[in-house]
Image: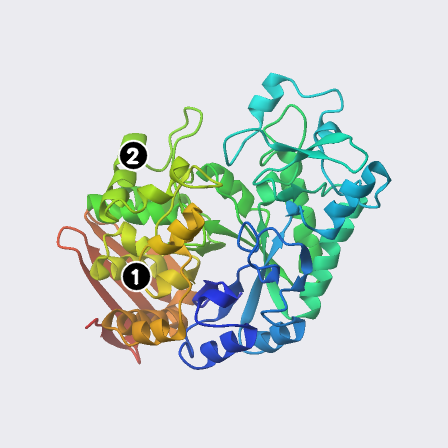
Amino acid sequence: MQNKVQLITYVDRIGCENISDLKSLIQNQFKGLFGGVHLLPFFNPIDGEDAGFDPKNHAQIDPRLGNWNDLKSLSEEVDIMADLIVNHISAESEQFQNYLEKGEKSEFNELILTEDKVFPNGASKEEITKIYRPRPGLPFTKFTLADGAEKNVWTTFTSNQIDIDVTSKKGEEYLDNILQTFEASGVTMIRLDAAGYAIKKAGTSCFMIDETFEFISAITEKARAKGIAVLVEIHSFYQTQIEIAKRVDYVYDFALPVLVLDTLFNKDAGNLKNWLAISPRNVVTVLDTHDGIGIVDVASEDGKPGLIKDDVLSDIVEKMHKNSSGTSRKATGAAASNLDLYQVNSTYFEALGRNEKEYLIARCIQFFVPGVPQVYYVGLLAGENDMALLKETNVGRDINRHFYTLKEIDERIDSYFFQNFKKLIVLRNSHPAFEGIFEVKDTKSNVLHLKWLNGKEWAELFVYLDVMEVEIIYSESSLEQKLTFS
């Protein structure tokens, strides 16, 4: 992965009808802005129950978006990251439909993970209670097979997302086939989606257990052998994230979004500085994603303190809801059909009360902390909460998944905000200091001073929280220059 700003987007929600249109957008309106693009699920179909994260066929591009040759063509313009959805397939997939028809005689019987494969003698109430869940209710859905038999099938997320047995021969073949397809089509990086849930073992939480780490390590080795780097997506206690980072190429810095909000809301960079002293360096940094703003990543766990005190964290969540005029509350938790109750669903711009100045400061912080910065397409355009889409789907995360028209995009890139953001992106992509050594300078908690030094080249960020002002200075031909925003 290039140490340049990365874009994360759906193909069909950013003013494009297909992959070829996206290539044109990258070459023109967004020329020179991104070192890589993470294409959110483009598999068949893109409009399933979970916006492509429940593929009927993970090895086929939705024909409405194009084909693998189109993706290969895009990869010649920009690095491509794709999702390897390791935990589940669609209930409408050929594999699961064959299983429903033939049961244990199905060639895909060992691929489909059922309750009795993990609990052959049945699961006790205590064992069920131990299982970590991203949503309320049991982790199983009862299906009736063609012969009338009933089976409890693992469905960690929704009843349309059928968990697979990744430890079985069929499970390995399934994932290997996707990796081979990616390799042939120019994909140079994968994100392991829902990897934390991939291994189920009786008597455990079935989330990030020792065997899960082993699985992640094994699939990382396979990908690396094909020239594909691995990013692991895990929302969890911060110490778990530190451990995962030691075993893979990249992890997300999911603690950063809330720590930046904490810094700006409370005019105190203390918690952020503490995190930067211990955080992994092989990270992809984000402020927003296609999911919500994660809370679990900074919260306490089982009596162990988190990165932010629980009472302060509660106030931050309330501040986000207030800043969005309550719209985020309508999309969060039990208020809508949410898969994860531990996130706040809102655009980051709305979480900051649509304050362009503070939003730009937040991006300055993201771009100056260690890691490769990734920008979500809605965040790129300082998007607002899409209440119409939320009302239409009642899916909480859709509040931050707007379908932009090309006209909307052209209007936003002509705005003062985007022109300022563009300056920041260009500096982050081009200045050699960001290949050097990072330092958090010792200051009062109401001042954040971050510095990068690479030989004689340097770049520094000053955030004066009391007055909410930002200053960026950097070297150019041995002279000091200042990045100014209009």
- Tell me the residue that label 2 is attached to: 314
Residue 357, how many percent across, how many down? 21, 61
Q: Is residue 330 visible?
A: yes
For marks 1 and 2 on the same chain, the one whose residue lies earlier in the sequence: 2
Q: Position of residue 472 (x, y in %)?
A: 24, 66
Q: Quadrant of residue 332?
A: top left
Q: Residues within 10 Å of mark 2 (few under 14, many from 20)?
A: few
Horizontally, residue 439 falls left or right of residue 444, namely: right
Q: Is residue 316 above or below residue 42?
A: above
Percent position of residue 430, x then y = 39, 74
Q: CA distance from mark 1 to mark 2?
A: 25 Å
Q: Residue at x 25, y 56 (%)?
A: 449
Q: Amino acid at mark 1?
A: Cys
Q: Front-most of 6 and 440?
A: 6
Q: Which residue is mark 1?
A: 364
- Quadrant where the image shows the C terminus: bottom left
Q: Secondary structure at mark 2?
A: helix
The image's mark for residue 2 is none
> Label 2 amino acid?
Ser
Q: Which coloring applies here?
A: rainbow
Residue at disc 1, secondary structure: helix
Residue at 50% across, 63% down: 10
Q: Nearer the viewer, residue 86 or 484?
A: 86
Decide if residue 277 is on the left or right side of residue 45. left
Residue 316 at x, y percent in the picture: 27, 40
Identify the image quadrant of the N terminus.
Answer: bottom right
Q: Nearer the viewer, residue 108 or 305?
A: 108
